[in-house]
Image (tube, rainbow, N blue to C red):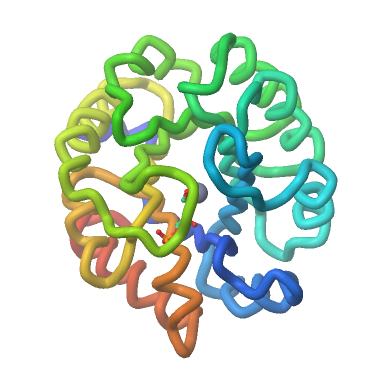
Amino acid sequence: MNSPHSPRKVRMCPSILNADRANLISEIERVASASDFLHLDVMDNIFVPNQTFTLDESIQIITSSPLPVDAHLMIVNPDDEAPEYARAGAESVTFHFEASTQPLATIQKIQEAGARASLAIKPGTSFDLIEPLLNHLDMVLIMTVEPGFGGQSFMSEMMPKLTQARAALDNCDRDIWLQVDGGISLETIVTAAEAGADAFVAGSAVYKAQSPAQMLSALRKLATQASGLE
Ligand code: DX5
Ligand code: ZN
């Protein structure tokens, strides 16, 4: 059972990875009314074979976004750079366990700068590796695609990992959110919600829709029904 100290709820986090980069602020405004966070995918062309926003470009988005920013850093050496995103005002900063040499120190620096701290794991990384850090975290991100690109197929074989994470999080005193990222759509969100996710990143499903806000509301409704959350 979920602890009464940590009422869970569904959170929708649209990714602007495949939105129109030339008009980002208006793209964010299209989803703002139906979203909890803006998911900002930061890629350095080293940790993943794709490049998106530099730290300076990210800071500009963080400071001008009408939605709180959920930064997902797919970069090497996040230990120095991740706290910068928190200092710039990101509400949540996620870095990859695979890329970090000092995850605990980085989690603490993010939190000291006033943001929520989160660890992401790639499909090939076992949840067991981050379990010892759970009591320090505000969110865990289980990737349901190989990080790097939007528009990939949801990996349903990650569901046992999500279920394992859900059980471990329910045993923690902290209110730790469980996020999924990759291939979330009307066809897959119920599977992820039933496996225990409560924060949902969606990129192409949202921005390919005629009305991104309506798509987010439809996704939220399905996730809420499937998880029994609010
Ligand atoms: C992939 C990114 C995702 C991506 C999701 O590396 O982390 O956030 O934008 O896009 P879709 O929803 O299209 O899989
Ligand atoms: Zn992401």
Residue 223: image quadrant is bottom left
Q: Position of residue 225 (x, y in %)?
A: 21, 65
The number of callouts visible is 0
Foreground of the two, 213 or 174:
213
| Horizontal side, residue 105 vs residue 180: left or right | right
In the rendered image, which quarter contains the N terminus?
top left
Residue 153 vertical position relative to residue 78 in the rendered view, above or below? below
Q: Position of residue 33 (x, y in %)?
A: 58, 75
Residue 132: image quadrant is top left
Residue at (64% x, 49% y) in the render: 51
Residue at (34% x, 14% y) in the render: 129
| Horizontal side, residue 89 vs residue 118: left or right | right
Foreground of the two, 212 or 45:
45
| Horizontal side, residue 116 vs residue 85: left or right | left
Q: Is residue 7 visible?
A: no
Q: Is residue 168 visible?
A: yes
Residue 54 vertical position relative to residue 127 in the rendered view, above or below? below
Residue 80: image quadrant is top right
Foreground of the two, 97 or 6:
97
Q: Position of residue 141 (x, y in %)?
A: 41, 37
Residue 94 vertical position relative to residue 104 in the rendered view, above or below? below
Residue at (30% x, 46% y) in the render: 197
Q: Position of residue 87 (x, y in %)?
A: 80, 33
In the rendered image, which quarter contains the C terminus?
bottom left
| Horizontal side, residue 61 vs residue 192: left or right | right
